[in-house]
Image (cartoon, coloured by chain):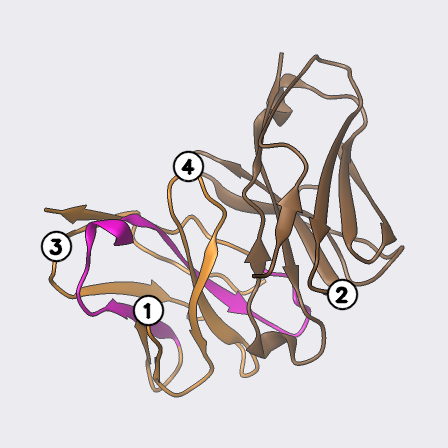
Amino acid sequence: DVKVTQSSRYLVKRTGEKVFLECVQDMDHENMFWYRQDPGLGLRLIYFSYDVKMKEKGDIPEGYSVSREKKERFSLILESASTNQTSMYLCATIRAGGLMNTEAFFGQGTRLTVV
Amino acid sequence: DAKTTQPNSMESNEEEPVHLPCNHSTISGTDYIHWYRQLPSQGPEYVIHGLTSNVNNRMASLAIAEDRKSSTLILHRATLRDAAVYYCILWGRDDKIIFGKGTRLHILP
């Protein structure tokens, strides 16, 4: 079975803390994505990465950064967490090359609460 | 980015077919149409995708309009386990997968 593993299912952090959300995949996929999901807003793309050390901004990158030092790991960083970053965070991966004829695999999500 | 429009919610009776519509009038010639669904407390999962021709797999069928400006996901015999949010997505050359708000499907026993 393919696996996309997010480090935590539930996380509670304080305002102002630096928060790391980790995503690891075992499928040797080049492309990885971070989304956040909020009621009534659906999934919104934060950042994505086509390869190691490469990153592209999605639709809502403000307040976030990412790190891709190894192919299998894509980290989402909240430099200084705020309450409006309380959300469900989802990681996804796809294989590069013939991309449009393949499927995306998602992790189970991390529900982050910032207090 | 090409966008999709779906109804917010739909209801269907168990063991009946379900037709979930999606409009994508700004689709480009190279965009694939993908469908994903998200069960409660889980990440989205792949359902089906297509480019121009209708497609069938073990989960569902995808009917694509001749002008490609709309498509319909067909669940042939809905079960309670099919209750989920269904997302229609256009997947283009830039691989920037953009989700809409999806359709919440309720299945009535």
Residue B71 inside the magenta-drawn segment:
yes
Q: Secondary structure at mark 3?
A: loop
Pinpoint residue A44: horizontal percent, then vertical percent.
57, 45
Amino acid type at mark 2: Glu
Identify the hue of chain B. orange
Identify the hue of chain A. brown
Q: Nearer the viewer, residue A49 or B7?
A: A49
- Label 3 – label 4 distance at C-alpha: 26 Å
Residue drawn at the location 35% of the way across and 73% of the way down: B70
Residue drawn at the location 46% of the way across and 57% of the way down: B45
Where does label 3 land, which residue? Answer: B14
Q: Secondary structure at mark 1?
A: loop
The label shown at residue A30 is 2
Q: Secondary structure at mark 4?
A: loop
In magenta, the rendered stretch is B69-97
Position of residue A110 in the picture relative to residue A41 (left or right) = right
